[in-house]
Amino acid sequence: MYGLRHGGERRRESRDGARPVKLAIVGGGAAGMFAAAIATERRMPCIIIERKARLGSKVLMTANGRCNFTKDIAAEKFLADVGPAADFAADAVRECPPRQIISFFRSLGVPLRRMADGRMFPADGKAATIVHAFGDLFREREVPILTNCPAKGIERVRPGEGRGRFLVRTASFDIAAENVLLATGGVSYPKTGSVGDGQNFAKTLGHSIVPYRPGLIGLETGDPRVTRLAGRRFEEDGRTKVLAEDGRVLFEYRGEVDCERFGVSGAAVYNAQRFIEHHRRQNRLEHGETPEKLSVEVWFGRDRIRLENPKPRPVKEAIVTIGGVSLDGINPRTMESKSCPGLYFAGEVMDMDGPTGGYNLTLAFSTAAKAVHSIG
Ligand SMILES: Cc1cc2nc3c(=O)[nH]c(=O)nc-3n(C[C@H](O)[C@H](O)[C@H](O)COP(=O)(O)OP(=O)(O)OC[C@H]3O[C@@H](n4cnc5c(N)ncnc54)[C@H](O)[C@@H]3O)c2cc1C
């Protein structure tokens, strides 16, 4: 296998000059799988290194196991919806827009279903169909995949030794690579393998990390109007509004509201919660630490509640992580580190997130494609 080296053989192999792999992809989730597909399409030798026993554990959970993998809208509309990361993601999304992601899955033979609002799913409503399609492609193209194999560190090596620019360390051997793509995801649902390793590796290599916050998550309330309806879903008549202290409406969203034992969830709540997180961050940047009082109004059926300074559920339960590797240190035209040549980023490991509706998987796919194109 390319540049694979067992710990005890270090001296001998550096003299022998084991052939480094062109691209080591750390993380076999949405971004990592897409990166490997694009790389092999271009005949770029690559290897996937994945912590869990199988690829795409989080993808399997998406949209309640149905996988809303993109939204069939133009790149410009997509970017207008994305929010704060839009400027950073613009080049990547324009180069690999939703239309191209749809064509990609069609080319793998996955029958697709388009909802009236443009959200795209596999036609059988099974996220596993998407993950299996990647698996079939990797088998056909003989992509080397190391599962059950968490990367333990990424080390830069001195140039000129014929070993590539990096060593990806695992528990029992190292992998020499010319380029490394960090596609290790955010920190939510850690049982899917995304635990913040990529952010730690990036920090060691000189990147700064924006503190984590939950994105697209439910809000807590003990209000009996909610708790007595726990388990009820309001698809048609759900709505949220985020209000400033002076009553100004800052954000409004019509969509699903679900009543839970802990409080409220569903797309309308998730997008309001995400808006609040970004609004607070922006406010902190502009006005310092003064806490701003915001409230959310939530409509479900004939009821309406108002939550003052609403409390989100913890980040480990969030759909997406807000925060991660700071975008300041990454070139948006290439996804390459500004300070560490050959180190690339894709997906949620970066401080980049979108609303519900296929935006986050699209961001993972488009940034992965951008990184691979830049390497190629
Ligand atoms: C419940 C839920 C539902 C969602 N539904 C949708 C949806 O319908 N549509 C949508 O667009 N988005 C959805 N998302 C968000 C979307 O799944 C993520 O944004 C997306 O998976 C991020 O892709 P990624 O490749 O960056 O990270 P991930 O898909 O999380 O992949 C990261 C991979 O890296 C691996 N890894 C981590 N550390 C290491 C290491 N040290 N060594 C090796 N491997 C490592 C992990 O095991 C994991 O497989 C949902 C998320 C959740 C939690």
Image (cartoon, rainbow, N blue to C red):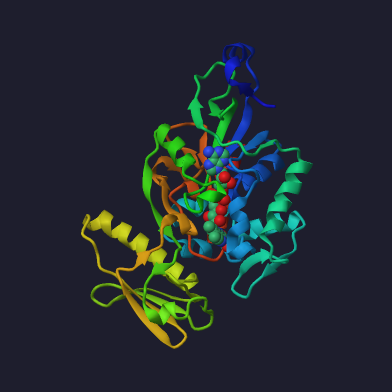
Considering only vertical position in the picture, is 7 above or below 259?
Answer: above
Q: Is residue 353 visible?
A: no
92 left or right of 137 in image: left
Name the residue at 45% across, 31% down: 340
Q: Is residue 280 visible?
A: yes
255 left or right of 39 in image: left
59 left or right of 309 in image: right
x, y percent for residue 368: 57, 46
Quarter of the image that includes the N terminus? top right
Considering only vertical position in the picture, is 197 above or below 238?
Answer: above
Quarter of the image that includes the C terminus? top right
Name the residue at 40% across, 45% down: 326
Q: Quadrant of residue 362?
A: bottom right
Report the front residue among 309 and 202.
309
x, y percent for residue 26: 57, 38
x, y percent for residue 314: 41, 58
Name the residue at 43% across, 59% down: 215
